Amino acid sequence: MKKILAINGSYRDDGITDQAVNKMLSAAKAFGAEVELILLRDYPIEFCLNCRECTQLPGDMPAECVQHDGMKQLVDKIESADGYILAAPTNFGSVTAIFKRFMERLVVYAHWSWEMNAPKYRKANSVKKKAILISSCAAPGVLGRWLYGTHSQLKMTAKTIGAETVGTIFTGMISKQPHPALPERVNSKIITLVEKLVSA
């Protein structure tokens, strides 16, 4: 049975991002997958200290952070999952602050000793898992996907944890209603993407 982990960086209960993630998880369950949802707005992760202690030793497995919070458990969940749903709406041109905080804590997936000019991804040579990216913005979807940094940040997150992006949902024009509903065309796309995510 495939294990799918969704990491949601939205601030709003039942906003567009929540709706898309929940529908995707329901579809994954229907395909026989085991699913788990992490809401970063409720998850105990501190800010990265930028001490780079976790990056000093080489190896394929993520290192341990000096902070003792929920990140260790979340990294364990990432490691045991077969596929991912990574989600964050666009705020000020990028992922939300809580998703960015999570991204920065993923430095445990990098080897970057002090003599190195740049980090190396620990999962660069591993068998790739699969990831689907979910985001939204006030601009038209196609424009927002290329104009803002959200999509590239979500894609970088997938790459860092050793996943290949196999699909994206990027919903635009969501700011004209206080409680927008997920467009029907997105609902139909979800089924197609989930099939890619849970397939062997």
Image: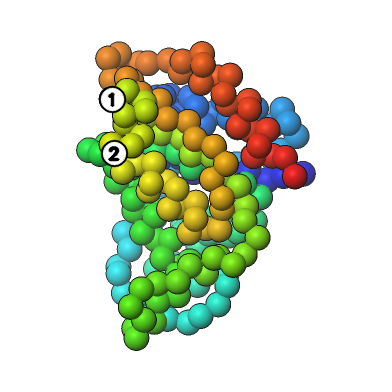
Amino acid carrying mark 1 in the image: Ala
User: Compared to 91, does 181 lie above or below?
Assistant: above
- The residue nearer to you, when weighing 24 against 200, is 200
Amino acid carrying mark 2 in the image: Tyr
Q: Quadrant of residue 150?
A: top left
Residue 139, disc: 1
Residue 148, disc: 2
User: Compared to 161, does 121 lie above or below?
Assistant: below
The residue positioned 45% from the left and 52% from the top of the image is 157
Q: Quadrant of residue 26?
A: top right
User: Most extreme residue toward the bottom, as rendered?
Assistant: 115
Relative horizontal placement of residue 18, taking residue 5 as reference (left or right): left
Locate residue 16, reporting x and y percent: 41, 24
Locate residue 86, reporting x and y percent: 48, 42
Crowdedness of circle 2 by 10 Å Cα count: few (<14), some, many (20+)?
A: some
Relative horizontal placement of residue 113, taking residue 190 as reference (left or right): left
Q: How are the colours assigned in the image?
A: rainbow
Secondary structure state at the residue bearing disc 1? loop
The residue positioned 34% from the left and 50% from the top of the image is 100
The quarter in which the C terminus is drawn is top right
Locate residue 87, reporting x and y percent: 45, 39
Relative horizontal placement of residue 126, taking residue 137 as reference (left or right): right
Residue 41, disc: none
The quarter in which the N terminus is drawn is top right
Tell me if residue 77 can be seen.
no
CA distance separating discs 2 and 1:
10 Å
| Proximity of marks 2 and 1: CB atoms separated by less than 8 Å | yes
Relative horizontal placement of residue 177, taking residue 190 as reference (left or right): left
The residue positioned 36% from the left and 34% from the top of the image is 145
Secondary structure state at the residue bearing disc 2? loop
